[in-house]
Amino acid sequence: MRFNVTKSKRVKKPLVKISPSKKIIIKVPYYYTKENISTFIKHNEKRIKKWIKKQFSQTIFYEKIKFFEGDKIPFMGKFYELVYSYNQNKKLTLKDKFFLDIKYRKSARKIFYKWFKEKAGEILSNKLQYFAQKYKFKYTRLKISYGKSIYGTCSQNQEITLSFRILFFPEDVIDYIIIHELAHTQELNHSQKFWQIVEEIIPDFKEKRKWLKNNRNLTYIF
Ligand SMILES: [Zn+2]
């Protein structure tokens, strides 16, 4: 089995990960020597192999979007086909498919970024406001980020950040992420009390977490 080993200042003990491109990565603390690394692998090989096998059977690997005609682009749980069109009013519109004016073929990625960021500004801020009001949470403001592995954060002064990429997920999962961050306005950590707040609002939140775990590669498609 081939591993890519990387050193990290953030990990305290070795961590095995599978990248969106199916590479097996072992992250080790930055002070680890070659001997440390090979000892770790030797002692844990069986366990690692078993874990990897399980990961590959559960994780969904999505192909990167190249913005060719016919590519499927996710938006709120559905995949929409990309079609190039001629002389549209807007650069990009979504109907039953994504229609992008052929003039902008070369900047497709940039235009999609912009479209998703704008949508995130509308949809996520409406949802956040709605849920905050409904469940009596207070937040100060919303920022939209580009995060791939971090879907959302909540700061100590109740400022919430959400990645525009969560718009790739189904709506119930988006709602879970928003509730999760709102719950942090009351409990900054992931204590039992925190999960109780989440569970009261989303009783099957564990299902959403499982979906996220298995579909985490979806945010890496562009
Ligand atoms: Zn959290």
Image (cartoon, helix red, strand yellow):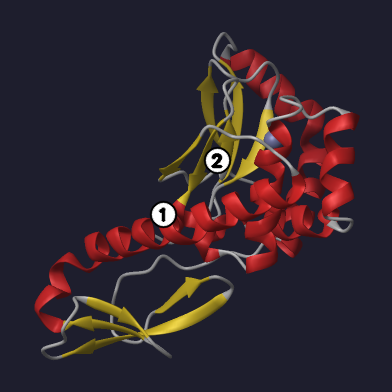
Name the amino acid type tagged 1.
Gly
The relative height of residue 130 versus residue 154 in the rendered view (above or below) is below
Specify few, some or many for label 1: CA neighbours under 10 Å numbering under 14, 14-19, or 20 or more: some
| Closer-to-camera residue (183/216) | 183
The relative height of residue 104 versus residue 115 in the rendered view (above or below) is below
Name the amino acid type tagged 2.
Ile
The relative height of residue 170 versus residue 215 in the rendered view (above or below) is below
* Residue 150: numbered disc: 2
Specify few, some or many for label 2: CA neighbours under 10 Å numbering under 14, 14-19, or 20 or more: some
Q: Earlier in the sequence, mark 2 or mark 1?
A: 1
If the picture is divided into quarters, which one holds ligand 1?
A: top right
* Residue 121: numbered disc: 1
State the residue at coordinates (64%, 21%).
37
State the residue at coordinates (63%, 55%).
130
| Closer-to-camera residue (144/61) | 144
* Residue 214: numbered disc: none
Of all residues shown, which one is farthest toward the top?
A: 31
Q: Quarter of the image for the C terminus: give it.
A: bottom left
